[in-house]
Image (tube, coloured by chain):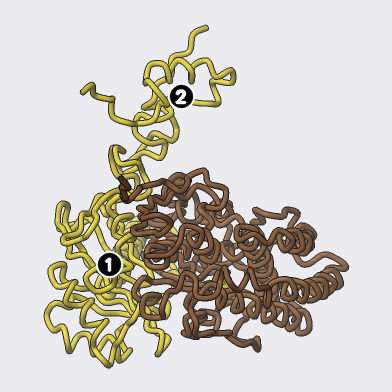
Chain colours: A yellow, B brown
Amino acid sequence: MSYVFDPSSAPNAKVNMPSTAPVPGLAAHIADKKATEAAEEAKWQKTYSDYEAAKTKAESEGAEPPKPPVRPVAKSDAYDMQWPVPKEPEDQDLKTLVELLGESVEETFEQAGELICQINKTAILNALTTCNQEVSLRYEMLSDMTATHYPAGDGYKFSVVYHLTCIRRRKRLRLRVLIPEGFEPESATQVYPGANWLEREIFDMLGIRFANHPDMTRILCPDDWEGHPLRKDYPVVGLGQRNVDFREDRSGKLMRRAMEAAGHLNINLKPIKAD
Amino acid sequence: MFKSQEMEINMGPQHPSTHGVLRLKLRLDGETVKHCYPVIGYLHRGVEKICENKAFFQGQVWTDRMDYCSAISNNLGWAEAIEKLFGITVPRRARYLRTMLNELNRLNSHLLWLATHAMDIGALTVFLYCFRDREKVLDVFEAFCGSRLTTSAMRIGGLLEDIPEGFEKMVKDTLTDIREGMLEYETLLSENRIWLKRTVGIARLSADDCLAYGVTGPLLRAAGVAYDIRKAHPYAAYDEMKFEVPTKTEADTYARYLVRLEEMRQSISIVEQCLGGLPEGPIMAKLPKTLKSEVGEVYHPTEAPKGEIGYYLVSEKGGVNPYRFHIRTPGFLNLQAIPLMVQDALVADVIAAIGTLDVVLGEIDR
C-alpha cells in the first residue's frame, strides 16, 4: 500500500482567515450593542407578527387561537464572570492627552481598568514624545510593544500597540495606531531606546517596517526566513516545512524521503546560490 | 614588529556560561570588550502562534515551557490575563494559594540564579548548597501538582486541586531549611574577597538606562527605583500581604545579589503570611464549560522573579481561542541592555553580566 501525502490536507496546514477585525473600541462597542438590540427587536417583531397572523387565521377558521408568545428576558448571570465593556474616558491622563494632541487622537476609552488612546498613524512619534516629556504625564518606560494582523480590517491591516508605564504615579497607558499594509510608522527608538528589539520582533513576526530604526533586521527567525509567522495567512506548520503527517509515518520513511527532496535540513531556507 | 588589532569572537551559542543558547558577538581589544552584539532566536518555538491556534485554556502548557525555572509565575500571569479579559472573579482561597505558590517559585528561581551565577564566577560550593535547598521547593511543587518543573498549576478561575494533607508542615519545614541555608550562602559569599572583586562595580546599569531600555525586576530595584508590580498594581492576594521592596543604589552585580537575597527573605515572609491567614472556601470560580469571548483587549503585567512578565491578549466575538497572544517576557528586554553593561569591561565580566541578568533563553526566544 502506498501512501501519498498531500500537504494541503494536513490539519495544521489549513489557514482559517478571520472574517472580522476585532479592534476593541467604545464606538465599535456601542454600534455592536445597537445592532444586537435591533436584531433582537426585529426577531421579536417577526415572532409577534407571525402570532398575529396565526391568530387571525385561527379566528377566521373558528379554531382555537394560538398561545401569545412571551418576550425573552436576559438570563441572570449564573457565573462569576462579567465581561468588561468599554467605558467613557474618565481618567485625567486621557483628557490631558486629548488636550495636548488635539485632532491626532482618534479615540479614547477605558476597558478592564486600562487606559487606551488611539492615535493617528502619522502622529505616533509626537504622541510618544508628549507622553515621555510632558510633566503632567511623564511615562518613563516603554513596557511592551506589539502588533496584530487584521486581514479583514477596512482601511487598515495592522494595529500597533505601545504599553507605557509611569513609575512615579503607578499608571499604565496603551497607545494604539491602525496602519495599512506597507505603511512604515516612525520608530519609537527615538524616544524609548528599548523599543529597538521590540520593533525588530514586530518586523520579524508581522512584517511591519519602522522608519528611522537603527537596525531593522530579523531577530528571532534566521535572516533568510521566508514570510512573517504571526500573520494570519501563515500556516501553523510553517511554509514548506514538515510536509509529512507524523501520525501516518511511524517509521519515518516518508519524512526521510521528504527531507531528501527538500534538501538539507528541510526547513524553508532559500536554495543556496553558487558564487 | 608588534601589531595590534581588534578581534571579533563569538561567545556562544554553546558556551556553558551563557545559560542556554545565547550568542554574543564581541569585538575585543586585548581583554577589553569594545562592542557587544547579542544574537538570539536559537530557541524560538513560536509559542505565540501556537497559542493563537489553541483554545484559551490550552495555552498554559506553553507558558510553562517559556521560563522553565519559574513556571508558576508564568502560569499565574497567563491565568490572570485571561481572567481579566473575561472579567472572572477568583475565590479568595485560590488567590492566597496562588500567592503562596508564586513566592515559593520566586525562592526556587532565585536559588537557581544564585547557584549558577556563583558557579560562573567560580564559587562552586554555593552551587551545591543552593541545589540542595531548591530540591526541597521542587518537592513542595511535586506534592501540590505532581510535577516539578513544568507545573501547569493554575486553571482559569482558580486552581485544579486544593492543597494535600500535611502540605503546610512541608512548606514550613522547607522555609526553615531555606532560611538556614541562606545564612550559609551569606557566610560563603557576602564578605568573600574573591566574590567582592568579581561583583562590586561590575556590569553597572544606571536607573535612567534601566527605564530607557525597559529593564525591570531586581536590576531596576538595584538601581534605586523601588518599583515592584506586586505593590504598584497588586494582583492575586498581594494587596493583603505585608512586605518590603528592597532597593540598593549601587546598580552593580553585588547590589543585585543583595537585592535578590532580601527578596528571598520577603518571599519567605509572604509564604508564612499566606499559610497563617489561609481562608476557607472554594478554590474555583463558577464558569461555563466553554469560554466564548467578546471583542476585547487586555495587557496584564505581573512580577516574575526576573522582572515584569506581561500577557497581551486580543479576542474576537464568539471566539474560543485568542485572536492575538503576545508575551512580554522580562528576559527579552533585560538582555537588550547587555551591550551597555559590558562596554569597556573585561571578557570575564561578560560572564558576570550574563549571570546577573538571570537569562533563561526559553523565555527570551519563546
Residue at 29% across, 88% down:
A137
Amino acid beneath label 1? Ala
Residue type, label 2: Val
Q: Is residue B263 above or below residue A232?
A: below
Residue wearing tag 1: A35
Decide if residue A223 is on the left or right side of residue B335: left
In the rendered view, does B14 fall on the left or right side of A235?
right
Circle 1 Cα neighbour tier, 10 Å, few/some/many (<14 / 14–19 / ≥20): few
Residue at the (32%, 48%) spot, across then down: B2
Looking at the image, which residue is at 46% across and 84% down? B225
In the rendered image, which quarter is residue B110 located in? Answer: bottom right
Q: Residue furthest top?
A: A1
Q: Mark 2 falls on what kind of element?
A: loop
Question: Is A13 in front, or is A257?
Answer: A257
Residue at 49 percent across and 67 percent down: it is: B309
Q: Quadrant of residue A48?
A: bottom left
Dividing the picture into quadrants, the one containing residue B120 is: bottom right
CA distance separating discs 1 and 2: 46 Å
Asked if residue B45 shows in the view, the reply is no
Q: Chain of mark 1?
A: A
In this figure, which residue is indicated by the disc labeled 2? A244
Task: Give the label on residue B172, or none.
Answer: none
The answer to whether residue A257 is left or right of residue B208 is: right
Position of residue B89 measured from the top left corner of the image (x, y, whole percent):
57, 75
Relative image position of residue B296 (x, y in whole percent): 38, 67
Closer to the camera in the image, A256 or B186:
B186
**Percent position of residue B119, x then y:** 65, 58
